[in-house]
Image (tube, rainbow, N blue to C red):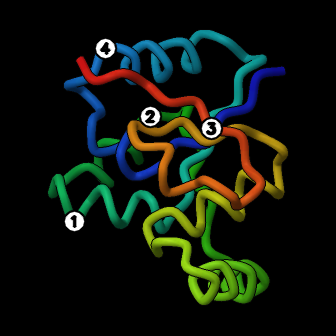
Amino acid sequence: MTKLILDHTVLAAMGTHRQVSAIVAGASHNIDQTVRVPAMCLAAAEAERSGLTRHVRYLPALQVVDLTTRDTGIVGALIALGVDWRNAHAVAVAREYSAPVVTLDAEGYESFGVETITLKAN
């Protein structure tokens, strides 16, 4: 089973980036692929592209991961360690599900123990 976590950079590129579109389309047609969207990443992408949350809500292949009470402690600790708040929930979700973070900018994930898949700019 393929598991992926989409961060805010990838979410903000939805609909305009060929590789992101391929990931979303692939997840729609492949029951062995799980694509998770951390809620804080979605909020950061929504800040860049108003209406994106509404679009993601109608894509059943994308599973939004809520920020639970347990997760707030983990995410808060990561932010205290210097992880950008836009990346912190992705790091926590990637660790929990042992899945790579798909991003356009892997720099924000260095030294936090998660694998990344860096997409190239269109």
| Disc on the earlier residue, 3 or 1 | 1
> Which type of secondary structure does the marked residue at label 3 adopt?
strand
Residue shown at the point (50%, 19%) measured from the top left: 23
Give the distance between the C-alpha atoms of the residues marked 4 and 3, in whole angstroms.
18 Å
Disc 4 and disc 3 in contact, CB within 8 angstroms: no
Residue flagged by tag 1: what amino acid is it? Ala
| Disc on the earlier residue, 4 or 2 | 4
| Disc on the earlier residue, 3 or 2 | 2
Give the distance between the C-alpha atoms of the residues marked 4 and 2, in whole angstroms.
17 Å
Residue flagged by tag 4: what amino acid is it? Arg
Residue flagged by tag 3: what amino acid is it? Thr
Give the distance between the C-alpha atoms of the residues marked 1 and 2, in whole angstroms.
19 Å
Q: Circle 2 sits on which residue?
A: 59
Badge 1: residue crowd in 10 Å (few <14, some 14–19, many ≥20): some
Give the distance between the C-alpha atoms of the residues marked 3 and 1, in whole angstroms.
23 Å
| Disc on the earlier residue, 4 or 3 | 4
Badge 3: residue crowd in 10 Å (few <14, some 14–19, many ≥20): many
Q: Is residue 115 above or below residue 30?
A: below
Nearer to us of marks 4 and 2 is: 4
29 on left or right of 33: left
Q: Circle 3 sits on which residue?
A: 116
Q: Circle 4 sits on which residue?
A: 18
The label number, if any, that marks residue 47 in the structure image: 1
> Which type of secondary structure does the marked residue at label 1 adopt?
helix
Residue flagged by tag 2: what amino acid is it? Leu
